Image: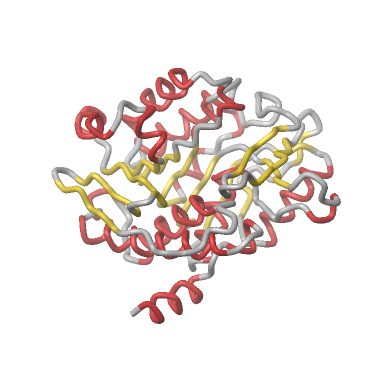
């Protein structure tokens, strides 16, 4: 059984001006990075993705496998084109993306490629909002989330708004996310995306109406916070020098999901404020370690690194 099953787009980042051999070793989008972060924290993960039979596709599939991710859809697709993201670092450390090929129906899964057994054989199912943006991937993502929910799996979802994917249509992204919320247990969301979903004041009603276990804001100036029933759980952010935030949010969430499994969580009934708080603290450390260094996958911490960091902090 896999601890985490992820679904989503694959892309590869590199800094403009770099030689092709110096790609940032990025598994591709949040689902791939989350899968690797889960594995580096001592758990297991598989990923369903559609990868183009091109240099980028071969590189990405090799990167996933080298890091222990089991491909749920291992075949390279001759009709698919893997997307590249050119990354520029702004003066404030923020990443600016330019997509060489816009993510679309040619590189994302369709329903026929989703195997119910893969979902049944996992404990946590994770997906991201990129795959709700275009083509047959929308139906495939909805199917995965619905099946995960119906099979009693913990369903995790990452609201990851990028204007280049959604054509600056914030309302369309918010509507697409709200449509799948009834299937979601754990929602990862940033401060800007909270605003997109109606603001902090709208969160309690959003949770109650859709049965969401929690909504989390990650790596903000105030750290992370979760809305758990009537309780707001907070974990202060750790003071670190951010060199490059590539993959930091994914590392946070991967460590968070790994912590749930390490604590023995197998169903939503096992989620308690204490378990959530512990997982947030564990993820906060992982994300902050990741921001300290540059290189995406190479900077996602191992479980041993996190435990050493926690011991030093204590």
Who's the residue at 65% across and 46% down the image?
89
State left or right for residue 170 relative to residue 203: right
Establish if 238 lies above or below 167. Answer: below
Who's the residue at 62% across and 31% down the image?
109
State left or right for residue 168 relative to residue 276: right
User: Within the image, what quadrant is residue 174 found in?
Assistant: top left
Where's residue 233, x and y in %? 23, 53
State left or right for residue 90 relative to residue 233: right
Who's the residue at 35% across and 54% down the image?
223
Where's residue 306, x and y in %? 46, 72
- Furthest residue toward front: 91
Where's residue 221, x and y in %? 37, 51
Where's residue 181, x and y in %? 34, 30
User: Within the image, what quadrant is residue 187 found in?
Assistant: top left
83, 114: nearer the viewer: 83
Establish if 147 lies above or below 21. Answer: above
- Furthest residue toward left: 230
Establish if 99 lies above or below 243. Answer: above
Q: How is the image coloured?
A: secondary structure
Marks counted in the figure total 0
State left or right for residue 148 relative to residue 116: left
Quadrant the C terminus occupies: bottom left
């Amino acid at each position: 059984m896999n601890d985490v099953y992820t679904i989503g787009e694959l892309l590869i980042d590199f800094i403009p001006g770099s030689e092709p051999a110096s790609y940032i070793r990025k598994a591709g989008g949040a689902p791939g990075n989350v899968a690797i972060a889960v594995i580096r924290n001592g758990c297991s993960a598989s990923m369903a993705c559609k990868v183009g039979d091109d240099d980028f596709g071969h590189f990405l599939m090799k990167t996933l496998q080298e890091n222990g991710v089991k491909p749920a859809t291992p075949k390279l697709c001759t009709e698919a084109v893997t997307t590249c993201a050119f990354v520029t670092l702004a003066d404030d450390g923020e990443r600016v993306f330019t997509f060489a090929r816009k993510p679309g129906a040619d590189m994302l899964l369709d329903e026929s490629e989703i195997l119910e057994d893969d979902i049944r054989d996992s404990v946590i199912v994770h997906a991201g909002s990129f795959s709700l943006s275009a083509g047959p991937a929308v139906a495939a993502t909805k199917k995965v989330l619905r099946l995960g929910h119906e099979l009693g799996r913990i369903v995790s979802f990452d609201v990851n708004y990028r204007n280049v994917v959604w054509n600056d249509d914030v309302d369309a992204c918010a509507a697409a996310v709200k449509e799948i919320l009834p299937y979601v247990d754990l929602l990862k969301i940033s401060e800007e995306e909270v605003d997109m979903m109606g603001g902090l004041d709208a969160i309690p009603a959003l949770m109650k109406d859709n049965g969401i276990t929690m909504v989390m804001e990650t790596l903000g100036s105030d750290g992370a916070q979760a809305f758990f029933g009537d309780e707001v759980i907070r974990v202060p952010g750790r003071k670190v020098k951010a060199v490059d935030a590539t993959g930091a949010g994914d590392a946070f969430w991967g460590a968070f999901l790994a912590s749930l499994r390490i604590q023995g969580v197998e169903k939503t009934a096992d989620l308690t404020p204490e378990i959530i708080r512990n997982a947030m603290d564990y993820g906060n450390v992982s994300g902050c370690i990741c921001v300290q260094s540059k290189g995406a996958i190479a900077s996602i911490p191992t479980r041993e690194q996190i435990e050493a960091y926690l011991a030093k902090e204590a």
